Amino acid sequence: MLFTNKNLIYVLSVLCTGVAAGVFIHQAIKPPAEQHASTSPPSYDNLSGNSALSSAISPLPLTIDIDEDKAALGEQLFHDVRLSADNTVSCATCHNLSAGGTVPQPVATGVHGRTGIRNPPTVFNTVFSFTRLWDGRSMTLEEQMNTPILNIIEMGSNWPDLLNKLRKDEDYQKAFKALYGEGISQQDVQDAIATFERSLITPNSRFDQYLRGDTGILTDEERAGYQLFDALGCISCHQGMNIGGNLYQKIGIFKPYVSSAPRKEIDFGRFHITGKEADKFVFRVPSLRNVALTAPYFHDGSVATLDEAISLMGEYQLGRKLTDAEISKLRAFLHTLTGEFRGKPL
Amino acid sequence: MNARYLAVLFVLSLIAAVTLSSLSVRYKTANDHNQSSVSSLFRQLKLLSASADREILQLRTRTQTSFDQLAGLKLEHDNLVSQLEGEMQTVFNALDSQRLLAQYRVLSRRSESIISQFKSSIAYTENSFNYSFHLTDEILGALEQRGNEKAWNLTRQLQVDVLQHFTTQETISSGSIDRSVKGIQSLLQQNDVELIEMLSVLNRHLTILFQGQSEINAALANLFELERNKALDDAHALYLNRMTDNRQNELTFLIAAIASTLVLLLTIALAMYRFLRLNSEKESLSFAISESEASLQRSNTELMKEVEQRVEAEQELKNAAIMYENCPLGVIICDADQRVITANPAYEKITGAQCADMIGQLPAILSEELLPAEILSNIKLAIKATGKWQGEMPVITARGTVIPAEVSIIATRKDSQLSRYIIMLADISERKKNEDVIYQQANFDALTLLPNRNLFDDRVAHTLADSTRNHKKFALLFVDIDNFKRINDTLGHTVGDELLQIIAGRLSASVREVDTLSRFGGDEFVLVIEDIKDVLQIEPLLTKLIRCISEPVTVSSVQHPALHVSGSIGVSVFPDDGKDLSTLIRCADMAMYKAKEQGKNTYCFYQEKMTAEAHEYMALETQLRSALGNAELFLAYQPIYTLKGYTADSVEALIRWRTSAGELITPDRFIPVAEDSGMIIGIGEWVLRRACQQLARWHQTVSPDIRIAVNISVVQFRDPGFGAMLKQVIEYTGITPGSLILEITESLFLDDTDNKVYPLLTEIRDLGVLISLDDFGTGYASLSYLKRFPVDIIKIDRSFIADLSDDKDDGSLVEAIINMARSLNMEVVAEGVETAEQLEWLKAAGCDKAQGFYCSRPEAEAEITPLLLSDRRMTQCESD
């Protein structure tokens, strides 16, 4: 008699109200949750350590404060081909640290031998640039990483597969557990690689030493090159700590840019992102640090030598055929921008 | 206690429960939220925007020349906004918090875009300003040279004007500038092309300058018009309002909570009461009464039910009729003699026959002439046994076409007599077509139309099962086209694709029908040869396959002479090499690589040791990846002595690898790995750079006439960046090109299918760098190569030198090489000299130089430098 249908409903309703009341009381007496310390990415100011800029170009900091352990893990991931769909391509394939952080070819080769249309930007000093990639598509290093990893012509992978592969590796399991806690998540992988990439700075170039006061370190020709760099106006775009990398500019102010790369479709740069007519042929001004080592040049990698690149810059941005003497001075100056990596010349 | 009363109580308690749980959630979030930190974030954002404005003005007035600070502020700004949004989300839901900041976000994005434009304008204006000043100086110089004082004065004035206007940022009319430029132009000589050109460039820069000025001003005006601060204030005010509302709501919540709790208590009390009452009423008096009442009610209910059923049945009939008329399936109904009674519109539509024409006829779709006998007998059997049949059959329409259809035939019975046949059919031609396409896509490679991996796996699974059962052997062939990637890279994918199609055609023409040929992707084909007695049996087939690949290929998509490709084949055999498919494929793959190693254009059978080799290879590759970074690679140097004065005039740089574990790995083990993985590009560059740096030091400390020889791998030489890299290294280290010797091997010439080696070698020679041909005599030594390619030095391979003393043939061969090199004006170096007799012999034969353990072992830089610093004479010979 007690558990007739009616009674059952009745008892159940009493039970569920009781549970709800319990939850309420529990919440009411629980202290408010602690605020999580915000982990914001390093800001410009922290990195520069040099807020009063006397010159348009300032030297790179000699060291950078990062978590060494995470960077070491990131370095391993950076060289790990398992990040690509068919286990053939790692970050380092296109950002070869012994080839200026890029590749000596116009475009790099991704999975299944596929190729893209843009020259891989160097991974060195990228932490000091204001956005990532040639068209500024990504703001942060963490975000940028998705582009090559997911792109079918680069690494062609996806996060679930990639994480599955990494999780099978006991060494990774241990390393991640020690640094990030149990499990390997996308955020953890991104953080480790980004941390490593932040560590890739090349300070103490001869020009930086010059900026720091050792004025005798440059030869007469190199100094003349620097003066010319200033007088011709190159420095208007290539300025700041990274000698570029902090603004967008149109390529081809004096004449329309015509790529000599073997491609049919036209690369309009930022136009592909913003859709604004004014953004056609606008690209992120590349950093000139280590430029002597990052041939070939321009966004399409169509220019094989530094001399050619200088000469074309003169034609496109200055409307002027630079003389051989001018090119040679500018080249001499650009060669002083090669820095040191881990204490050794790049 | 009646049912309605109970229901009310139940609903009340449910409401109370829901209210309480939602309240608990609200209570939690309100507690976690920190209002003052949000206000502080709003304040920081305003401060930041003020800093940005200041920075922008500084850039405008050129008191700031770098964009770093502005970029830094933007980063900080984005950070703050996302923090703010995070805070908001702890108290409002995601949509609400986005709405709060929506206006501000819109304005920020717009200002971001204006600032981008502003930066770009500032930069190119600055550029034009700088450069026009520089250019004006040049023009002034030129005018001074020409003595054109009038034009000089005008130009000077123009320079001052521009400077003044630009620095005071007044916009001046570009018309007036244009006039001054024209004025100067009119003072020039018409044939002074150089000056006129300079002036026109100047004019364009000035135009850009003024255009930029107005763009900058417009950008600034737009920027300061955006009321970002107001949007921020609005958002803040809105936020505070919502928070006040929230607090008022909290009071309401509290009251509601108390009320709900009261209701709850009441419900619990009632429950207890009922529980007790039920227990006390042990005997129910009212039971008999309620029982008779219940039986009355039951009969009543049954009556009602019957009426309902009739109404329902009528409705069902109507529904059936509607369904029959409108359903997309074609339906015909036949009587017991199989004569058509009626057909629905869908049937008419599908078959194209008219209902009126069919009535009284046998249904056309079941006609014995048209239907395969097998299906017809199936139908008869099924109808007899189960009363229905369902299946696919071809249907001939009144239009004369045949369509695939899914047909159901149901025989209905009335009083155990067959009464009707209901035939339903659906046109499945669309589905069939899709299924065909899907089957094709899922199982065949779109390019070559060969079975793909999927179908291959399926078929080989059968073969595997069959062979296991019947103890038969089968062979799995892994076919790969050599250097296919290069064809793709140099001639394009269209050519590559066509080549693959042609090769696929040839391969499938060369095998039997029963053999499974499939494409695994890229240039890899896999072939299964079933039922073989022993391995040797398939050798003729392998030869045939290799030959059919290497026949010239004419590709239509490009005007190109016939392509010559070759293939490498790896073979594994079931069950000898593996008992499952993946093992067999892996073994065949390894054997294929072995075939490539053996010079390509050949085949190779799997052997057990290959697995071990592959493991070692992979381990080596992984280790090598980090070797350069870990500074595990280093160079050793071995002097090369002249045989005239026994003096070391050059040194060969040799790469060495000591792993972090201390193991020394020889170059012949790791260089092939580096070449295959492409790492050789980086490693080779490092070697060259390091060697040249060392040479530069020796030039300063020892003597400027020392030369260094560096080995260049074929892969490295083929890298398109090689020439540029070489120049850069020479330039960077400042060595004289004539002191650098690049050692290449003969295989480079053999591999020169696209004729790139010759121009590059010539280019290198033009730089002044010397070319040395290493390991001469081992490979495919051909005099024609020596004549065709620019080579300065020949290095006779160590194997000839080792056999000198006991082999007369080798002796005469070495002599011949020396004589030939002489006639071609080349220097000859003997490698691997290990004894005094060999040295003597070589000297007598007229060899120029020698290198080897007898003369000096390869040593680290620290050992070699003192040796070079002494008189560089060979110690053994001094003691002689």
Image: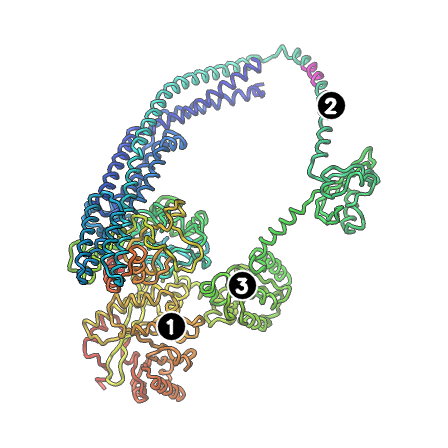
Circle 2 residue: B310
* Placement of the N terminus of chain B among the 4 image quadrants: top right
Q: Nearer the viewer, residue A192 or B465?
A: A192
Q: Nearer the viewer, residue B162 or A285?
A: B162
Q: Does residue A20 appear to the left or right of B448 in the view shown?
A: left
> Looking at the picture, how far across and down is residue A206, in whole percent?
21, 58
Q: Are marks 1 and 3 on the same chain?
A: yes
**Tag 1 secondary structure:** helix
Circle 1 residue: B759
Amino acid on which the number 3 mark rests in the picture: Glu
Residue B649: which numbered mark, if any?
A: none
Per the rendered image, the range of residues in magenta is: B294-301
Vertical comparison of A187 with A85: above or below: above
Task: Classify mark 1: residues with Cα within 10 Å, few (<14), some (14-19) or many (20+).
Answer: few
Circle 3 residue: B498
**Tag 2 secondary structure:** helix
What chain does badge 3 belong to?
B
